[in-house]
Image (cartoon, helix red, strand yellow):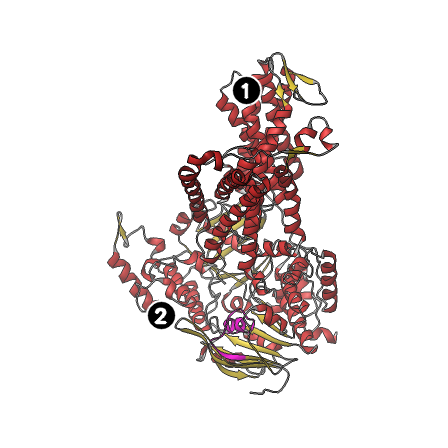
Amino acid sequence: MNHTSGGLQLAGITKRFGSFTAVDSVDLEVRPGEIHCLLGENGAGKSTLMNVLYGLLKPDEGQIVIDGSPQNFTNPRQAMAAGIGMVHQHFMLVDPFTVAENLMLGREGGFVLAKDAARQRVRELGERYTMPVDPDAVIEDLPVGVQQRVEILKALANDAQYLVFDEPTAVLTPQEIDDLMAVMDRLRSEGRAIVFITHKLREVRAVADRITVMRRGRIVGQAAPTASEAELAEMMVGRAIDLRVAKEAAAPGEPRLVVTGLKVANTAGGIVVDGVDFDVRAGETLCIAGVQGNGQSELVDALLGNVTPLEGTVTLDGTDITRATPRQTIDAGMGFVPEDREADGFVAPFTIAENLVLNRSNQAPFAHGLALDLAEIDRNAVALREEFDIRAQSVHDPISSLSGGNKQKVVLARELSRPLSVLIASQPTRGVDVGAIEFLHRRIVSERDKGTAVLLVSTELDEVEALADRVLVMYRGRVVGIVSPDTPREVLGLMMAGVPLEDAQGAPRPGKEENHG
Amino acid sequence: MTTTHPTTLDVPLELDRTESAAARRARLSTGALMLVLGALMAWLGFGTSGDASYALSDAFAAVQLPTVALPGLPVVLVCALLTLLAGAGFVSGRLWGRAKASAATIAAAAIVLGFVTWAAAGRPFSFPVQNQLAGTIALATPLVLGALCGVLCENAGVVNVAIEGQFLTAAFTAATVGSVTRSITAALVAGVIAGVLMGAMLALFSIKYLVDQVVLGVVLNLFASGLTGFVFDQLVQPNSTELNRVPPISRLEIPLLSDIPLIGPVLFNQTILVYLAFVSVPVVWFLLYRTRWGLRVRSVGEHPEAADTVGINVRAVRWQAVLAGGVFAGLGGSFFTIGSSVSFIKDITVGNGFIALAALIMGRWHPVRAALMAVFFGFVTQLASQLQTLQTPMPSQFLLMLPYLATIIAVAGLIGRSRAPKADGVPYTG
């Protein structure tokens, strides 16, 4: 370890939560003027490590050294004073406050708020870092990309020399990701050090100067940005991973799910799905791609019957289910993997066995009259645990004791354990480790091959490319276009920002090529 | 890596809007209520004869204003028509934004004016307008102070259902200390300390021990009722001449302003507590929206994690807000005894703390709106008691209900985008 002046060193950091060691004697060094990628799966300990660095958590062992002097942070204020800034995954912005109020919070100056000075400061910062933003805009009215810009400015307002970006790309469009990368590049060239936390291999290779990989709380190795994605994935997971999903070409049959002119309002009355038409055929996967919050969730809610559409029709195998209740759509053969697994996917305190029959707990063979057939429920659970490789000690454990990937396997197992006409899966691999992603993807493909119509909602282009037979791009509640999955990423990215297919194809290619033209 | 994409997402979201199911239900039911009341008023209106007289000043006023006589039949019918029109507007769904708010306000005013005119028409008594206004101020004073207490607590993320308990302990303490010391100032200070101490219990259990805040509030109310009742029975009652003889509070007349006819005596010849209540509203507004402390209070009530990550001590700020709220609740509670020169009796606050809470919620956690709602509640309560004295042919229970119907209608027009602080009632464990 190099203890000369300059740079940030974490030495032997250990953080335990009870008997669980989240971070296990980790050494990490970040030098000024570099982008240091911290790569690892969800739960590998990256965020815990950074929360220690930011003074939000106190390490049980180890030391933080900045520019040669050891630090002992007990709160974020001290970390900020030492030059550490953090761009949080879940933005630390107060929604009803303006941009200026958010930037002044915690460093307001005098007792009476100097709002004009704060506005001026926002403008100056925006100009200095070429991230202009309206100081009087209220955060909740701003798109996520701009909110993130505010979050970055907040860190820079403190003149942070060491910036931590925690999964910054999760909520951005591909174009916004490019912009973010450009910002990170500029900050690096100013001599600031950046820690970039992610689990997306493509981004790592694009910007990193050095890569450190974490697994289960430990550092498992360093890699150069020239390392292949397969190599990085193997380091992350600890075994060789097949990043490509093997699948045959689709053999689409008759349309099973047909949606025409669908219009849906959210609870506040905003029209968030505006005249959407599509169909999903037997034996094909239609992928709805788009940045989060462009109406996908409400569309799925309407299909399932959670929300009654304002206009339009939905038919399933020729039956009109536009105004059906969830019970009716389930009975009509609709399987559903919800996007918010923890909230909508299962009942956390229930056992794995109980969760596996949630959708059929009122019918044979699991129920006779008012009584549940517990033996049958157990038999079902043991069989599904085997088939879906659910890693649990016992099917009588509460589902909350499982990892994200295994919870999702329970949800998918429950939905696929009965004959389906349509499977709707929203973000089925979000927050799931790479190993489980591989398994979940294979099961979705095999369900398609059985002749089920699969509707997959995803914001991850990797997932879209891996699974889709057709890609429907959604933007602000409308269908921008339905294209083939081998459409270039740049074109898909532009479509996700609302540019129609023809214009997107004609647009200059982003990135390096542009500099030649 | 400089790129120039058409980042169309930089434009703020502009969605077409339609009505949410909840808003639709609220609109239709309010409209239906207006139509029913309008129709009832019209039916009553045709049976109205004679004039309704409104006495603008009482017999003791320096400047005597005339008694205004409104012709019963046309006034009631016009009010009925306005209410029906507003109701029709609500039911048809043609009203938006400002027009909707105005229609609701007009309908509420028309309902009050129409029914009062009907009730007063052809009676030997005139409706005492100045009494109505003076009573409004008296009833609203503790409500305004209680609502401000709630505004401070809840903007910091602590639900305060215990305003009633704070009122009661403050009323008791102020009465006892005032009786012993014969000093209004000492009594008010004691009342404030009692309010702050109750606030400290709320803060201790909700912020430090993370107790469910609604349950805690209910328990604190029961505690306050039990404690004051017990001490009153055991100690105060047997020695009531020493311990429960409240010193009279004097009125402070503001020169010139108090000479304005009608409103002068009502607004500018009041006790110190009333002035304090109404000055507190802009003070709390300024504290919350124009100072460093207020920004921090609102941030810990909305997104405590964000406040924490910029180095704000979330628990400390919440403590401060709850204790500051206790000051206002303490003043509000003192009004029931010291402020009105009334001896303490058990449960003297009779649910006013809950009405303050209602004003806070209907005022959507904003100090000025909450104070306006408090004044409105004071107005309708006073109106209900005035109407009882007019000896109308209508059952008095129905008349007592009217002001609250008017409240519901007035509030229906005020529904906007503001909402409860996001972390209201959520303990901070980080």
How far apart are the alpha carbons under marks 2 and 1? 77 Å
Q: Based on the displayed image, in which of its 4 quarters is residue A417 positioned?
A: bottom left
Rendered residue at 38%/63% (across/down): A400
For label 1, the crowd category at 10 Å Cα-Cα, with few meaning under 14, some 14 to 19 and many 20 or more, is few
Residue A53, magenta (yes or no): yes
Q: Can residue A290 be seen in this view?
A: no
Q: Nearer the viewer, residue A419 or A395?
A: A395
Q: What residue type is labelled 1?
A: Thr
**Left or right of A262 in this view: A342:** left
Under circle 2, the secondary element is loop
For label 2, the crowd category at 10 Å Cα-Cα, with few meaning under 14, some 14 to 19 and many 20 or more, is some
Under circle 1, the secondary element is loop
Which residue corresponds to mark 2? A391
Q: Can residue A80 be seen in this view?
A: yes
Q: What chain does mark 2 sit on? A: A
Percent x, y for residue A59? Answer: 49, 75
Please report the bounds of the magenta region as a residue range: A46-63
Which residue corresponds to mark 1? B389
Rendered residue at 55%/59% (across/down): B316
